[in-house]
Amino acid sequence: MTVDNHKGSPFQDRIYDTYTEFAADGTAYIYESYSNDYGQTFSPRVVVSTTSPLCTNTYGLPTPHGTCNENQFSQPFTGPDGALYVTYANFNNSLNGPNDNHNQMLIAKST
């Protein structure tokens, strides 16, 4: 969770929440929602972790929201222009070879 505390940002005081949904089909996508009323209500959720050329192994799982379907540990933060950034750990790595067990950190930016 983070709050846009940048003076002059078009989204100053907006609260952002990100989380992983561990679905019954084995996927784990990162979602984001925000509040403009100090946490009284939140927006509908949006998928943050969608598709990247770095997500090459989907483990044979469904990809309803993109190929980056194994994620967790999201950390949101905001820029002075009001953009939301979310970093997260992605586990769509190779099962063997030199890339085995070398998980990656990805970043997504909203506009």
Image (cartoon, grey):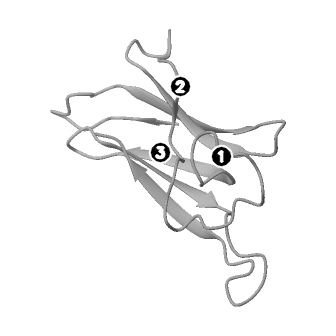
Q: Secondary structure at mark 1?
A: loop
View extreme (bottom): residue = 98
Q: Residue furthest left?
A: 8
Q: Give neighbour class at mark 3: few <14, some 14-19, many 20+ (Cα, 10 Å).
A: many
Marks 3 and 1, the one that precedes in the sequence: 1
Q: Quadrant of residue 14?
A: top left
Q: Which residue is mark 3?
A: 76
**Residue topped by disc 1:** 63
Relative horizontal placement of residue 49, taking residue 35 as reference (left or right): right
Identify the residue position indicated by label 2 in the image. Answer: 45
Measure the C-alpha gap from mark 3 to mark 2. Answer: 14 Å
- Whether residues under marks 2 and 1 lie with C-beta atoms below 8 angstroms apart, the answer is no
Dot placed on the residue nearer the N-terminal end, 2 or 1: 2
Q: Is residue 14 above or below residue 74?
A: above
Report the amino acid beneath label 2.
Arg
Question: Where in the figure is residue 47, as x and y percent of width and height?
Answer: 53, 36
Of the two numbered discs 2 and 1 in the rendering, the one whose residue sits closer to the viewer: 1
Tell me which corner region of the image, top left, top right, bottom left or bottom right, holds residue 81.
top left
Q: Amino acid at mark 1?
A: Thr
Left or right of 60? Residue 7 is left
Please tell me whether residue 5 is drawn above or below residue 70 in the rendered image: above
Residue 84 spot, x, y in % from top left: 36, 42
Q: CB atoms at circles 3 and 2 under 8 Å apart?
A: no
Circle number at residue 91: none
Please give the name of the residue rendered at 66% of the width and 71% of the height, measured from the top-left corner: 103
- Residue 71 rendering spot, x and y as whole percentages: 66, 53
Category of crowding for the residue at label 1, using alpha-carbon neighbours closer than 10 angstroms: few (below 14), some (14–19), many (at least 20): some
